[in-house]
């Protein structure tokens, strides 16, 4: 049942440019009979190629997500738990709601949510029973009814707590670190003789930096909300003499939100993201030139990840993430100093909508996508899969082995790709 790395077949481009399998008889999941991988005749099979290493294009052979035939698990015996880790993101409540609703539609009636992330797993009072009637109206609420958390107790203790509760399905909503933690819980469970467990990850990061996936839930809402802030910043800059607006947006390692919000708003004069090496002296000169040449409306967007590339991070939080200095406030001070040195009476309006965006309710696209992710997660666990994540890859909804998602380098903006080039025409 475990959809682990050995099930991820690889192929390379053949002479005619088409992908060729490295195995003549692709495996199937023991708990999901008939749902084979690419290379066979199964309608659930899919071959995707997200990467392009020098020796040829890499192909990942993964199952399509979606309902299967006969469930592996007897719904009457299913005991499921939902765990939320990491920071807030639009759509969390929608995912929780649809997980509960779909489990109940299968006939499962024992579903819990853990309050406090992984740390709450070992605290009995943090286990909250969930049913359709108490999640029915949370779909469009921002935040999460299951308080998120960072950090975790020993994995063996969490595995023991799951066994004590009789849990056989675990849904972990979180980033790549959380997905790695989910697999470590499974490994710890196997070590104590508790291996009859389906573990599914639903990748979550508002920064859209999960490897392999086209995008993560909440990202489109974040871009839409960030675009609204940029529009406000433009109005402020264009309606005040000698005024520049500076907007700081989320993006610890990836400048995706800043890039796409800038492209969506079309009012950004300068967009700074961590993927680009920045000469601060040239940058400041350019800002002065922009202010002198434009009659109105200079807007600068900076991703928070510049706090790690331009400045020095200081320590880490409970989740292991670097504590980065505020790049937005630092840049604001640098610009003000340059203006003062030049004797320019210009002013800066500073916008930091980070927490407003994180706590927003999902837009229609993300709400729909969250529902699909949750449904596919339950379809996968009920079919007997474990150690997998659900997501969209190359436009297809698939189940990916968790190690492939958790152990790859975070996705960043490709500065040679079309999106980045498009940003140059703002």
Image: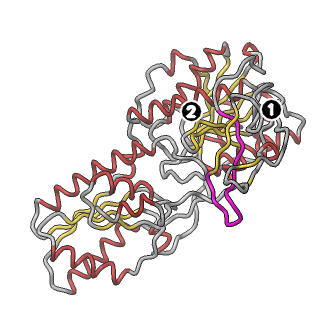
**Does any portion of residue 136 appear in the rendered image?**
yes
Numbered range of the magenta stretch:
50-64
Q: Residue at x 69, y 25 (%)?
A: 80
Q: Is residue 357 magenta?
A: no
Sequence order check, earlier mark of 1 and 2 = 1
Tell me how many marks there are.
2
Tag 2 residue: 373
Query: SS for tag 2?
Result: helix
Identify the secondary structure beneath mark 1: loop
The tag on residue 126 is: none
The one nearer the camera, 236 or 2, is 2
Residue 81 location, quadrant: top right
Q: Please report contact status of discs 1 and 2: CB closer than 8 Å, yes or no.
A: no
Q: Residue at position x 54%, y 33% from top? A: 146
Q: Give the labeled residue for mark 1.
A: 29
Labels 1, 2: front one: 1
- The x and y percentages for residue 177 are 65, 51
Q: Is residue 45 above or below residue 286?
A: above
Label 1 neighbour load within 10 Å: few <14, some 14-19, many 20+? many
Relative to residue 179, is residue 310 drawn left or right? Answer: left
Residues under labels 1 and 2: Cα distance?
Answer: 20 Å
Q: Position of residue 290 (x, y in %)?
A: 21, 74
Horizontal and vertical percent position of residue 228: 27, 48
Q: Is residue 184 above or below residue 343?
A: above
Name the side, left or right, on which 179 lies relative to 134: right
User: Residue 351 location, x and y as percent?
Assistant: 29, 58
Q: Could you tell whether 283 is left or right of 23 in the image? A: left
């Amino acid at each position: 049942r475990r959809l682990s790395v050995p099930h991820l077949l690889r192929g390379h481009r053949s002479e005619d440019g088409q992908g060729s399998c490295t195995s003549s008889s692709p495996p199937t999941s023991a708990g999901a009979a008939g749902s084979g991988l690419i290379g066979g005749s199964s309608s659930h099979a899919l071959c995707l190629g997200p990467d392009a290493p020098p020796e040829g294009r890499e192909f990942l052979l993964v199952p399509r997500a979606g309902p299967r035939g006969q469930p592996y698990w007897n719904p009457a015996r299913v005991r499921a738990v939902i765990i939320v880790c990491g920071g807030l993101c639009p759509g969390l409540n929608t995912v929780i709601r649809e997980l509960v609703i779909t489990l109940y539609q299968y006939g499962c009636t024992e579903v819990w949510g853990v309050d406090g992330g992984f740390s709450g797993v070992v605290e009995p009072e943090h286990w909250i029973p969930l049913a359709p009637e108490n999640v029915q109206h949370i779909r469009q609420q921002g935040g999460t009814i299951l308080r998120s958390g960072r950090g975790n107790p020993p994995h063996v203790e969490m595995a023991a707590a799951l066994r004590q509760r009789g849990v056989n399905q675990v849904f972990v909503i979180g980033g790549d670190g959380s997905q790695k933690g989910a697999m470590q819980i499974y490994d710890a469970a196997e070590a104590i003789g508790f291996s009859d467990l389906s573990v599914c990850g639903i990748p979550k990061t508002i920064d859209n930096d999960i490897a392999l996936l086209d995008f993560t839930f909440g990202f489109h809402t974040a871009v839409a909300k960030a675009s609204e802030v940029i529009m406000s910043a433009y109005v402020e800059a264009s309606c005040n003499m000698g005024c520049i607006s500076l907007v700081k947006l989320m993006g610890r390692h990836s400048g995706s939100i800043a890039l796409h919000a800038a492209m969506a708003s079309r009012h950004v004069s300068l967009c700074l993201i961590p993927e680009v090496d920045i000469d601060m002296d040239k940058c400041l000169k350019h800002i002065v030139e922009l202010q002198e040449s434009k009659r109105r409306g200079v807007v600068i967007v900076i991703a928070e990840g510049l706090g790690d590339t331009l400045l020095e991070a200081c320590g880490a939080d409970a989740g292991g993430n670097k504590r980065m200095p505020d790049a937005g406030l630092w840049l604001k001070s640098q610009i003000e100093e340059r203006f003062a040195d030049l004797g320019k009476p210009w002013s800066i309006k500073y916008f930091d909508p980070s927490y407003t965006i994180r706590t927003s309710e999902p837009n229609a696209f993300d709400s729909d996508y969250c529902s699909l992710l949750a449904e596919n997660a339950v379809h996968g666990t009920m079919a007997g899969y474990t150690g997998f994540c659900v997501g969209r890859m190359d436009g297809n909804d698939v189940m990916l082995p968790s190690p492939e998602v958790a152990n790859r380098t975070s996705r960043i903006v490709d500065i040679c790709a079309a999106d980045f080039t498009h940003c140059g025409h703002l």
